[in-house]
Image (cartoon, rainbow, N blue to C red):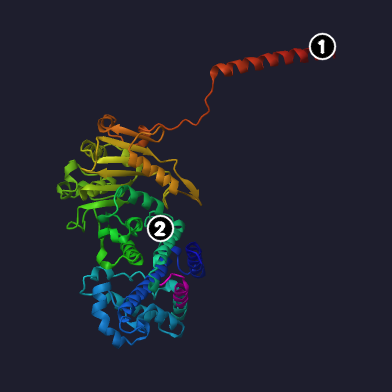
């Protein structure tokens, strides 16, 4: 079976699980169970493969899944140091799933397993990476059924379906399917959940464009950061493009929503990013950033929430915050977009690049936002502005844009404006960036040359004269698709028509006279 066929089978299985349990659990809530059990299977197989590999150097027939819990305890400290967690053999996914139908207390068994996995990291350097990972998987929820018997039947079905997923195995070092399953699930739920789902997920094609912009010309990078990381798809795109080992110091991000924070950490593990290679924090990035000791970052990507409220000038500490103070003014309380932009700029390394998806209003709105744009332009921090097509993102149809920031890495005093509004293909009820669309935008970004009706290179001074307006349409003239009309030729054609009409009338009058 080819990789594409395996992927198709995997997706069919996920749809079947969703359809079988539809009705009792809302689609967007149900993802917690599917992703949770997928994660449970992943870490069980991950640990089993790791211990088996070590033990089979001595005993080729060693199998961690069948030894006693007492014997396995010898490997606890070793496992926690290497993997960040420990699971007893009796609590491995394969063993719990195998005995699920005969277990009248399956819900309580699973709750105990999840508690024990989280507790195994207590006191270790991985504690914060595992704490609360399973808290959204409520195995006693009435959504699964009104009785214990009904709930356990649903849980058994989910365990069986997850067990039957063709996800490869660790003996072959093939774990891509776990990450693929996660991305398909998130895409599926975001497509059907509207804004409530889409806010957690940036389409993979947009993630790819952002990542490739920030690593242009590089084969490796020290560390990457997303201050509003959601489920982590933007960060993990670097691992796919460069290879996870070429992100030297790891993946950093912060997320304010606790459910999404848990999803992001699970996503890291499912893409085989070990606990010591990522640092995902929980909290409000604008008022309580968690990575002061880790900045600056070489590549920053983000799709922060659009025009949300924040403390702004109601918090007297913020105007003196080094992230915001340089502009001399704070973003409006009702629109935090440029607060995220200033935060990102502050934590960007001198040689780094940041690519931010922005709400279009930040490009032209007046007041405090205009003053912040002026600061960014005068200091030559804005490298490129890219207009994206409309209807790319889940839950929102507006045409967003990308602002690319650089510090000393910028080579001129111009801003490149790229009109990518027509660069898309239709995919279902959404638009999508194709590989050709991405390549065209990237090539234009790389070459930094004007292209008629597509890209313009404008001096900073000209942009400032235009009220610091960064709207791409102000600098890139749209192609006129209306048919050109030759007025002289048209007049001749009209005169000829009038002549024919006159002759026709004369003929009709003659016929009438004869009658």
Query: Mostly what secondary structure, the magenta segment?
Result: helix
Q: Which residue is mark 1?
A: 513
Q: Residue 485: x percent and y percent?
A: 54, 23
On residue 338, which mark appears? none
Which of 461/258 is in front?
Answer: 461
- Give the SS element for disc 1: helix
Q: Residues within 10 Å of mark 2 (few under 14, many from 20)?
A: many
Q: Is residue 391 visible?
A: no
Tell me: 422 left or right of 413.
Answer: right
Q: Quadrant of residue 162?
A: bottom left
Alpha-carbon span between mark 1 and mark 2: 79 Å
Tell me: 440 left or right of 305.
Answer: right
Q: Which residue is mark 2?
A: 197
Range of the magenta residues?
156-169
Q: Residue at x 24, y 68 (%)?
A: 128
Q: Is residue 497 above or below residue 37?
A: above
Which of 240/354 is in front?
Answer: 240
Q: Is residue 138 above or below residue 28?
A: below
Q: Residue 349: x percent and y percent?
A: 21, 49
């Amino acid at each position: 079976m080819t990789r594409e066929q395996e992927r198709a089978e995997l997706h069919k299985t996920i749809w079947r699980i969703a359809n079988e349990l539809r009705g009792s659990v809302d689609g967007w809530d149900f993802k917690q169970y599917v992703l949770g059990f997928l994660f449970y299977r992943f870490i069980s197989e991950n640990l089993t493969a790791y211990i088996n590999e070590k033990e089979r150097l001595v005993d080729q027939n060693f199998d961690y899944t069948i030894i006693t819990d007492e014997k396995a305890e010898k490997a606890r400290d070793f496992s926690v140091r290497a993997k960040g967690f420990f699971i007893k053999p009796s609590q491995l996914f394969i063993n719990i799933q195998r005995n699920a139908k005969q277990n009248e207390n399956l819900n309580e068994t699973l709750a105990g397993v999840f508690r024990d996995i989280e507790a195994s990291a207590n006191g270790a350097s991985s504690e914060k990476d595992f704490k609360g990972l399973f808290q959204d998987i409520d195995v006693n929820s009435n959504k699964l059924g009104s009785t214990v018997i009904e709930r356990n039947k649903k849980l058994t079905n989910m365990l069986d379906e997850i067990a039957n997923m063709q996800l490869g195995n660790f003996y072959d070092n093939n774990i891509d399917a776990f990450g693929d399953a996660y991305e398909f699930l998130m895409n599926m739920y975001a497509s059907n959940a509207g804004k409530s789902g889409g806010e957690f997920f940036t389409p993979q094609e947009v993630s790819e464009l952002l990542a490739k912009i920030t690593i242009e010309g590089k084969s490796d990078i020290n560390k990457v950061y997303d201050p509003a990381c959601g489920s982590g798809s933007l960060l993990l795109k670097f691992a796919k493009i460069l290879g996870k080992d070429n992100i030297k110091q790891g993946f950093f991000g912060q997320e304010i929503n606790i459910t999404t924070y848990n999803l992001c950490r699970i996503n890291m593990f499912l893409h085989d990013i070990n606990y010591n290679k990522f640092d995902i924090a929980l909290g409000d990035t604008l008022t309580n950033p968690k990575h002061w000791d880790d900045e600056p970052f070489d590549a920053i990507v983000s799709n922060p929430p659009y025009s949300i409220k924040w403390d702004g000038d109601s918090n007297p500490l913020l105007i003196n915050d080094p992230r915001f103070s340089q502009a001399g003014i704070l973003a409006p309380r009702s629109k935090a977009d440029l607060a995220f932009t200033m935060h990102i700029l502050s934590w960007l390394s001198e040689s780094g690049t940041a690519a931010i998806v922005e709400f279009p209003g930040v490009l032209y709105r007046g007041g405090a936002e205009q003053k912040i744009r002026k600061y960014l332009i005068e200091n030559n921090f804005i490298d490129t502005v890219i207009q994206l097509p409309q209807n790319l993102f889940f839950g929102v149809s507006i045409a967003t844009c990308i602002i690319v920031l650089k510090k000393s890495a910028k080579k001129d005093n111009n801003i490149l404006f790229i009109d990518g509004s027509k660069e898309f293909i239709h995919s279902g009820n959404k638009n999508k960036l194709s590989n050709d669309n991405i390549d065209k935008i990237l090539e234009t970004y790389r070459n930094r040359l004007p292209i008629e009706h597509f890209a313009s290179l404008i001096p900073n001074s000209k942009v400032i004269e235009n009220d610091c307006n960064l709207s791409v349409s102000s600098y890139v003239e749209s192609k006129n698709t209306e048919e050109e009309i030759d007025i002289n030729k048209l007049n001749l054609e009209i005169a000829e028509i009038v002549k024919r009409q006159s002759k026709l009338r004369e003929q009709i009058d003659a016929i009438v006279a004869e009658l």
